[in-house]
Image (spheres, rainbow, N blue to C red):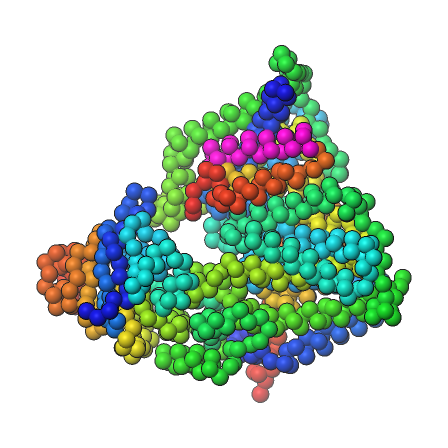
Amino acid sequence: MSQSLLELRNVSMSFGGMRVNDDISFSIGKGERVALIGPNGAGKTTLVNVISGDLTPSQGAVHLAGVDVTALPISDRVDAGLIRTFQITRLFKSLTVAQNVALAVMQRKGLTRSMFSSPIDRPDVRLEWERALGMLGIAHLADRQVSQLAYGQQRLLDLAIGLALEPKVLLLDEPAAGVPSEESSKIIEAIDRLPSDIAVLMIEHDMDLVFRFARRVLVLANGKLIFQGNPTEVTHHQEVRRAYLGSYADARHAS
Amino acid sequence: MAWTALSIGLDALSYGMVLFIISIGLSIMMGLMRVVNLAHGAFAMIGGYLASFALKSAGVGYPLAIVLAVLGTIAIAFPLEFLLYRRIYRKSDELTQILLTIGIAFVIIGVANYILGPTTKSIPLPSLLSGPVDLGFRMIPAHRIFVMICGVCTAGLLWLLIDRTEFGIRLRAAVDNGDMAESLGIKTQILFSATFALAVGLAAFGGVVGAELLPVEPFYALRYMVTFLVVVSVGGAGSIPGAVAASILLGLADTTGKYLAPEYGEFFFYLAVILVVFLFPNGLLGRRH
Amino acid sequence: MTDRIMVDGMSAPRFSVPLELRAVAITLALGALGYTLFPDDLAFLTRLISITLLVLSLDLVTGYCGVATLGHAAIYGVSAYVVGNACLAGHSDPLLLLLVGAVAGAVMGLVSGLLVTRFKGLPQLVLSIAVGQLIAALANKLSSLTGGSDGLSGISPGRLFGVYAFDMYGRTGYVFSVAVLMVVFVVLLRIVHSPFGLLCQAIKDDSLRARMIGARVYPRLVLMYGVSGVVGGIGGALNAINTGVVGLDSVGFERSAEALVMLVLGGAGSLWGALIGSIVFQVFEHYVSAANPFHWMTMVGALLIAVVLFAPKGLVSLGGLLAGRAASLLRRRP
């Protein structure tokens, strides 16, 4: 494996007496595409929250490009290139589509301290937010208020904000869940076209998408990392089938 | 010196108990319905007015006046719950809650002043409570002892209600997880209405028995609104022990301040509030939501 | 924000010079209108402008940052007292006094911001109230600086630019106030459309998402509180300069609550809303509250309930809605 960009060392997370993540260790290298799967309640979203810094793990450490970031606030991790998207769409609803993405661009460029000028139309800034919107095919919606967007378009915008932050490590929390097929194909295309050197960790339920996207699959069940391997290995692994894939296989069989 | 301290302590305790009786309803409402109800003090005031009317104009006895005041206040508050409060349970943002409930408080103040005039309305005490009691080192109005007993009984009965009854089990389940409680078939709307009635009733009760310490007049609702809110915040929303601790602590801060540095008014009280809330944003005994 | 007024897919205009010019024109027109309507009551208008600045100041933290505060008058009142004392100490140049007020307001704003924006929800509200009440108690106690309940009086500012005296008719004060309001309004339009202003709105919408694009939420909010302090401080300074008296009411809870009422009436999160709300409210108050202060309270309460139920985004959104209806009617015509 090449240089590790994201590494978890024995991460555990408890709420009250409930252990939601239990002694999880893995690492993701430059350019890797990794999927995190597991049944509902396995602790996937909690793990993403721990990695992104929304939660501080009860035990263990998170390393980013070799640096221990466990104690760092969210904003420092973002500066270091650790970017996430959200399972439930979270956008800035009183801003326009363009402003949502432009704000991310300006934040990355350190322009959000500016109080009197308006660099949103500066060529270098404009080029970037237009490109991010263009990549997801929503450039024509730039001047809309976010509240006027359909759900699928909101998901595209969420991803556009993530891309505009130029991630080194990108965490995608069910990027295509509940999205109509027209938009989900755009999301998949955009994920396919992500810069090849960034590391991507995707939580996903749609196994077709997982197999298309991931070279490596992590399986989480009851808070524990029960298996990791390439997609073929995962499908043939007994414990994984029992814990999770059984239902998937059955569903396939039924359909 | 020691007697002075004990004396301050007694005054603080009786004042704190009044704060507790009135604020605990607000605290439970905030814990369960997440409503910042700035009109809570207005309901205590309504209770006081009703008791004063019952005693002086209708000529009923003190215990019956308390019951009438509590029931009357709930009756007056119910339409407000049905028409207004229901819209802001749990969901709405805080600014909306503040505006709506401060609007309700303003209307109640304006109407109370229009009907009853700006003067303070007394609530005559029965002879049993109106005399002084000799504690050996000082005389204390019997009424203050009565208030303390009321406070202790309220806390005890509430604890029994919440810890030991079916209502309490549902209440706690809904506080912990409203959505899950709903899916388990607990009718949260009925639960919310019952809790609202309980909260308003407690406010009215406190308004009546505490009238000697917090005199009933139209601006009552605004004057003590902040104090009640502070008790909830310092104690932690939804926590009975928290509210008891906060009430006594704030009663102590206020009473001590007035004894030792009366010219500073409420300066030390609010200084203490800022320190405590900044250091314990979820309250002394509160939980994170 | 102006694009909030736009409805039904009308695209929002990007920030450009014409918006500022429009703001200049509108404030000047309002100033002229006021002068025509109330030529004998300029004192009322200057007071109105001073309070309008407080409401604009509140809009920055409540409308643009989502901070619910019931203690904002602390900023306004402290500045008014500081300006009054500076003037009594012999620094009577009006522009200097305005600067003094802005600085005092900024300091007070930063201190409030540090305390109030640290948390959300109940602790935030209680801290905002406690800061306000603390200042009010201090103002009452430090009577050598504030005049206590009698108020601080005898403030007589010098001539503006060394030429125009603040006369008893209040013309100088009025023109001065209109000019200050205009400048502040234009600068604020720039600020709320700047990246900093947009980021504050983003934090209001979803502070976790804002963190996830790398924003440092607390420092941004404290900074906006500082800006808000400057604006509120200028309002307090105008109050002291124009009336010559500063009373305890300028730091009181009622002043904070009323400013909030004006803001939501007009529409929080829009500078135009703050402007409209404070004008409508105060003109209304001017006529009605004199008749009976307690009826006034009932009406304000009923008004608040009505705004929350029927126009949660304030008058400015109703205006936008009407404009949108009118536009679509026109479009439907063959």
Residue B237 in the image: state x and y as whole percent: 48, 41
Query: Which residue is painted at 20% across and 56% down in the image?
Result: A225
Q: Is residue B226 left or right of residue C160?
A: left
Residue A193 in the image: state x and y as whole percent: 29, 79
Residue sitting nearer the eye, B195 or A25? A25
Q: Is residue A141 above or below residue A210?
A: below
Q: Is residue A82 above or below residue B133?
A: below
Query: Which residue is painted at 57% across and 41% down in the image?
Result: B273
Query: Which residue is painted at 61% across and 36% down in the image?
Result: B44
Q: Is residue C250 visible?
A: yes
Residue sitting nearer the eye, A249 or A45? A45
Please say whether residue C194 is one of the residues in the magenta stretch: no
Residue B230 in the image: state x and y as whole percent: 57, 41
Q: Is residue A114 left or right of residue A59?
A: right
Q: Is residue C180 left or right of residue C170?
A: left
Q: Is residue B123 above or below residue C167?
A: above
Query: Which residue is painted at 75% across and 74% down in the image?
Result: C28
Q: Residue furthest right?
A: C168
Q: Tell me which corner region of the image, top left, top right, bottom left or bottom right, holds residue C275.
A: bottom right
Q: Is residue C210 visible?
A: no
Residue B272 in the image: state x and y as whole percent: 58, 39
Q: Tell me which corner region of the image, top left, top right, bottom left or bottom right, holds residue B68.
A: top right
The quadrant of the image that shows the N terminus of chain A is bottom left
Q: Is residue A79 above or below residue C290?
A: below
The quadrant of the image that shows the C terminus of chain A is bottom left
Please say whether residue B248 is one of the residues in the magenta stretch: yes
Q: Is residue C125 left or right of residue C25?
A: left
Main SS, magenta region, reads helix
Q: Residue furthest bottom?
A: C334
The magenta stretch is: B239-261
Residue sitting nearer the eye, B48 or C160? C160
